[in-house]
Image (tube, coloured by chain):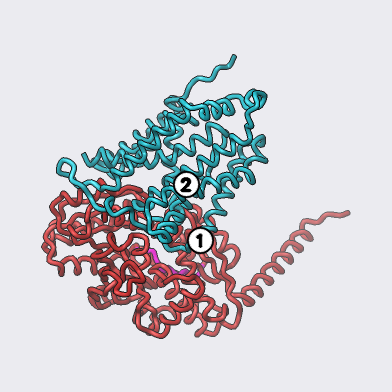
Amino acid sequence: MAIIVVGLSIGMLIFLLAAGLTLIFGMLQVINFAHGALYMLGAYLAYSVAMLTGSFWLTLVIVPLMLLVLGLVIERVTLRPIYDADHVYQVLITFGVVLVIDEVVRFFWGLSGRQFSPAAFLVGSIDIFGTEVSRYRVFVIVVGAIVMTALLLGIEKSRIGLTVKACSVNPDMAAALGIRVERVRMMVFAAGAGLAGFAGAIAGPMLPIQLQMGNAILLDCFTVIIIGGLGNIRGAIVAAFVVGMSRAVGQQWAAEWVDVFTYSLLVLVLLLKPEGLFSKKERTA
Amino acid sequence: MSFSISRLARQALLAAGLVGACTAAHAQDTFRIAGLVPLSGAFGILGENMRRGATIAIEERGGEVLGVPIEVVWDDTETSTQVAIQKATKAMARGVDMIFGEASSTTTLAIMKLAEQRKVPHIVTLSADDRITGADKSRYTFRTSNNVAMEVAALLAFAKNQNLEKMYIVMADYSVGRDLAKILETELPKNGIEVVGTEFVPIGTSDYAIILNKALESGADGLSLVVVGADVATSLKQGADVGLGEKMTVMGLMLMDETQGMVVGERGSVGINSTLRYHHTQDSDRNRDFVAAFVEKYGELPNQYAGEAYDGMSWWLDTVDATGVFDKEAWIDAFEGSVRDSSVEGLKVMRACDHQAEQVALFGTAVPDPSGELPIVMEIAESFEAEELFAPCE
């Protein structure tokens, strides 16, 4: 049972981060290398908000909003001028954002890591079928499920989702129909940054808050969005669970082979279905 | 225009001679240090702390040695042996006077070979692999910090003194870790402690829940948790949720100190036992000055990586200065057998036979900070004298 709970919690955390990444790629066709840095910044901000307010719950509200605003600024200043440029410029500019965020974190929080605790009732463990499982992990699963449902409904069933998809599939046509594509793009990037901040705040009580904490998990996120199909939220959900469960099961039976399992899966997908397992075929005519 | 091969060769020789003369003269004008440390990747935070500690050692002497300014170039090895070798090669081509670093033992072993070929002194303040001052020892490499053997000896003695019966081993999956696990699996039973399981975990693992559950369910009363880099905080933080420290005696190498406690928090840190290579509370004038300078410059307490780096760099530079000559071989001769009674870690002696610093080993236990300023403070639980840890030089 512990394997399932741990696997689900790993998957949910990866999903929370990968969702923003895949949303940005799906809409803007930008591979955002700064996503891991935004996640790290979210965790540090969550620490500071928790220290200032003494409330874990407030961190989950304030931090995503702060990152959302930062996302608006980053999109406006760095990405908007180069949407039409080669992808390499977008990669370079998002990598530049990583360096800036790293230095900001160094300046304000120093090199020492930080930590904060969740709400009191989320501390400790509960007994599930004879195995002690962290309460916080169960909380992560519940929160992840709520975000997942909201995202799916928002993208697939709402007018906003329809607008975003229209801007993604045919921005010129969307613009001709009166949609302000630039504004939609900005909001999508900001939403992705907000999700990264939310993931950082959620991860704070579970993982060490320290510089470069985004690097390792970002690798998992790229694995998830490649397996699931670039820009595909449903694919990201399934792939996040596959990666999460493979890590949990791998650790139970052969911990030293976990990375080999995960990345072999990635290589297999790239060889057999490079567009991702859940990508939809594009209409060409 | 006539062309003469011999004339061209003469001009080339003259040019080479001038370049050589300029380089030699330049070497007398500055003391050049290549700081090869990981500033990014899994060991990035270790390297940054090493840089900070060494920087204080340079600044406290006014940035000079042998009457010339110290010019230090910090190169990020990116937690990659290949990158480190490339950068070490470039640094030596620049004609540096010493190499400082690296963090990873595998990388340090590779740099050692280059340093030996180019006859450049090389100071190691973190890498613990026994081969560095054992099978692969070199005239040009000195380790001012602990080696694996002394840390394991301390850990074994500590485990024995805790009257443990069964031990579970969780080990970082790298070359030193594999060697360490073999030693523990052999030596623990000799001390009456049964090893009930060993788990190798890749460096950079972000989730230790399953592995720690296995340790808890193994029936062991002790856990040797030997992980590195960010994995230390990850494992202990996640262990806190299942009451790891309350259910098992957890011990490891460089597993806990006050700065680590800030990342892990009081709940996950209290009761954790760890070797302490350096501790900021060391009662000496030099250490007080170092801690004050470090806090003033960086706004936080120095951790073990910074303390070890400061100690090694300041010891080496003092030794170089005392020779009064710009001669690498003379510096090495002077460092062999030198005694550092003002070390920030207590008395240290640089063994001439293997270039390993002989020193005491400390084992500390994390307890809540009575002042409430920090999540925890380390209490020295046991101290092991150098004579217990090192075989005499033959």
What residue sits right under mark 2 in the picture?
Answer: A64
Chain seen in cyan:
A
Q: CA distance from mark 2 to mark 1?
A: 21 Å
What residue sits right under mark 1 in the picture?
Answer: A106
Q: Within the magenta stretch, is there residue B66?
A: no
Badge 1 crowding class, 10 Å Cα cut-off, few under 14, some 14 to 19, many 20 or more, is some
Q: Is residue A81 left or right of residue B356?
A: right
Seen at 37% across and 36% down, the residue is A146
Q: Quadrant of residue A15?
A: top left
Name the amino acid, label 2. Pro
The one of A42 and B134 positioned closer to us in this rendering: A42
The one of B75 and A47 positioned closer to us in this rendering: A47
Q: Secondary structure at mark 2?
A: helix
Seen at 50% across and 20% down, the residue is A281
Residue A5: give its label: none
Q: Position of residue B292 (x, y in %)?
A: 45, 79
Up the image or down, A255 lies above or below B303; here it is above
Seen at 59% across and 83% down, the residue is B67
Q: Which shade of the palette goes to chain B?
A: red
The stretch of residues the image draws in magenta is B119-128
